[in-house]
Amino acid sequence: MKGDRTRLSILERAVDFASLQGLEGLTIGRLADDLGMSKSGLFAHFGSKEELQLAAIQAARERFLSEVFRPALREPRGYPRLVAICRNWIAYVERKVFPGGCFFAAASFEFDGREGPVRDAIAKAMDSWVESLETAIAKARDEGHLDPAVDVKQLAFELNSLFFGANFAYELRTDRDALSRAMRAIENRLEAVRITS
Amino acid sequence: MKGDRTRLSILERAVDFASLQGLEGLTIGRLADDLGMSKSGLFAHFGSKEELQLAAIQAARERFLSEVFRPALREPRGYPRLVAICRNWIAYVERKVFPGGCFFAAASFEFDGREGPVRDAIAKAMDSWVESLETAIAKARDEGHLDPAVDVKQLAFELNSLFFGANFAYELRTDRDALSRAMRAIENRLEAVRITS
DNA sequence: ACCAAAAACGAACGTTCGTGCTATTCTACG
DNA sequence: CGTAGAATAGCACGAACGTTCGTTTTTGGT
């Protein structure tokens, strides 16, 4: 179906737009103009702005997974894979996978004070991401690469915080050193609980 | 002047609104309704929405300083003051000084992809905040409370990242443990470079 | 108590928003 | 090919947006 292809290309642009202007600032008229199509033609693909937002979140998730998470699965289980996830995250900001910086960091701070399905979808996506991080840490521990006493949730919290801090300093403050600083902090934190036999 | 009083009460509400709906989602009509005054009456105080946003940023800055930074000045210079700043930051999220979570974290991620005076004002406010953090660290080092070899910018980056991570987990994920986790990470990080004589 | 100045109001502007409808164009299968 | 059904366009709507303007109310010094 042609509609499916169109829908996908709409969502790709929608995700880019949203990373720059926010999910609420994402507007059907501007998006349609940018794609050279009519408001109503675009609108018909989703039926409501909320559905467009929800679809954009899923599309962003897909892009994120294929840029950050899935490539890391090529690395050996345990510590190497955990480090690869972190490295990929930093690279994902540097390569501007989303032109306005991390889509999910922006969406998280945009919707944390609101209610409704969009907020819930973002919260769910972030829960799933943090959970993946925790799983990667737990696997590294179970493989004997990390101190068995490591606090999995605590470490995942700290790594994720560093990701957000990196995105902030890189995007808003245009601090060129932000990403290397983040990577250094991550490596130090991981080395502290690493077991090298 | 009565106008000054009105202006201040407008800004207090504007800042609360913005922390919930974003600085762009902050709307003159809704704000006027909420305050029981007319759109045009409110508008006249600022002359444009952009001026309202800029004034709201300054008002938020004032609230932040008096809740987080200034109280810490009562603590002795050096390590105690640095820890007080961190503690106050965590408490400031817990006490919901801004009802939608940290105003500046939200504004940073909302405007990092944009251009113009509002973005610049936010960037300036954040530069100044990070600088204050760096100064507090440098003072603690100079007082002999921290390892003289401590990387000031690196440590400030990491502390700030943990603040953002705490706000994220507390507000979006409604993780009750987020703040204690952040505080634990901060304390561990500071203890690692502390000099106890 | 008066009166100029300051503050607030009410109505309207042009624009853009999301959303419905109906008509037209395209697409893909028989 | 032809044609049913999908895809897109066109147009209109009501609401909300920021903004302007002329008028009315309130304020505070004399």
Image: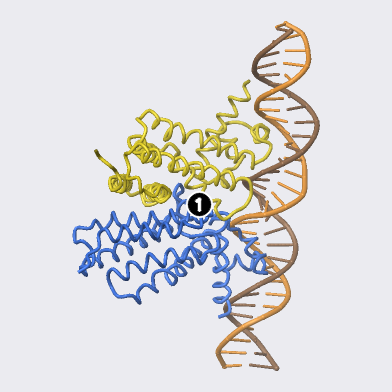
Chain colours: A yellow, B blue, C brown, D orange
Q: Residues within 10 Å of mark 1 (few under 14, many from 20)?
A: many
Quadrant hosting residue A14? top right
Work out whether residue A117 or residue A99 is closer to the camera in this orientation and state it. Answer: A117
Dot 1: element: helix
| Residue A12 pos. (x, y %) | 52, 33
| Residue A59 pos. (x, y %) | 54, 34
Is residue B74 placed above or below A142 in the rendered structure? below
Q: Residue at x 63, y 25 (%)?
A: A3
Q: Residue at x 59, y 54 (%)?
A: A114
Work out whether residue B175 or residue A99 is closer to the camera in this orientation and state it. Answer: B175
| Residue B42 pos. (x, y %) | 61, 67
The number of numbered discs placed on residues in the rendered structure image is: 1
Amino acid on which disc 1 is placed = Phe
Residue A171 is at least partly visible in this image: no
Q: Residue at x 67, y 40 (%)?
A: A48
Q: Is residue A9 left or right of residue B114?
A: right
Quadrant hosting residue B187? bottom left
Q: Which residue is disc 1 drawn over?
A: A109
Residue B188 is at least partly visible in this image: yes
